[in-house]
Image (tube, rainbow, N blue to C red):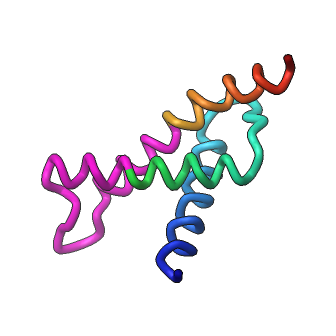
Amino acid sequence: MFQLLWILLIGFVLGVIAKLILRGPQSIPWWLTMLLGAAGAWLGNAVAGWIGVRNTSGIDWIRHLLQLGFAVALVAFVAPAWSSRRTR
């Protein structure tokens, strides 16, 4: 249970940072921001494990940058689709 809450919290933080990095308004709800951030974290972890940088002796900067990069990409892809869906 605690791990699920942690995943959602990290997902929300990554989603908000991704929205701040992107230009313009991203009119997606907070729950979608959280899910996209969590998906970005999951994808970033998977790619970090695949390239062999998931666990290092210090702070896993490459893994965190991959997580944030995937969160930014997901928000950038989904936000326009969400807003065009809502305007129909």
Residue at 32% across, 55% down: 45
Span highlighted in magenta in the image: 43-72
Query: Does residue 36 show up magenta in the picture?
Result: no
The quarter of the rendered structure image containing the C terminus is top right
Give the camera-side residue of 15 and 20.
Answer: 15
- 26 on left or right of 62: right
Residue at the farthest right position: 87
Is 52 placed left or right of 35 in the picture?
Answer: left
Horizontal and vertical percent position of residue 46: 28, 51
- Furthest-top residue in this view: 88
Q: 60 above or below 77?
A: below
Magenta part mainly helix, strand or loop? helix
Q: Residue at x 59, y 40 (%)?
A: 21
Query: Foreground: 22 or 34?
Result: 34
Place of residue 14 in the rendered image (x, y in percent of width and height, measured from the top left): 55, 55
Question: How far across and how far down the image is residue 60, in percent?
Answer: 28, 64
Residue 35, percent across and down?
A: 59, 51
Q: Which image quadrant for residue 9?
A: bottom right
Q: Residue lying farthest left?
A: 52
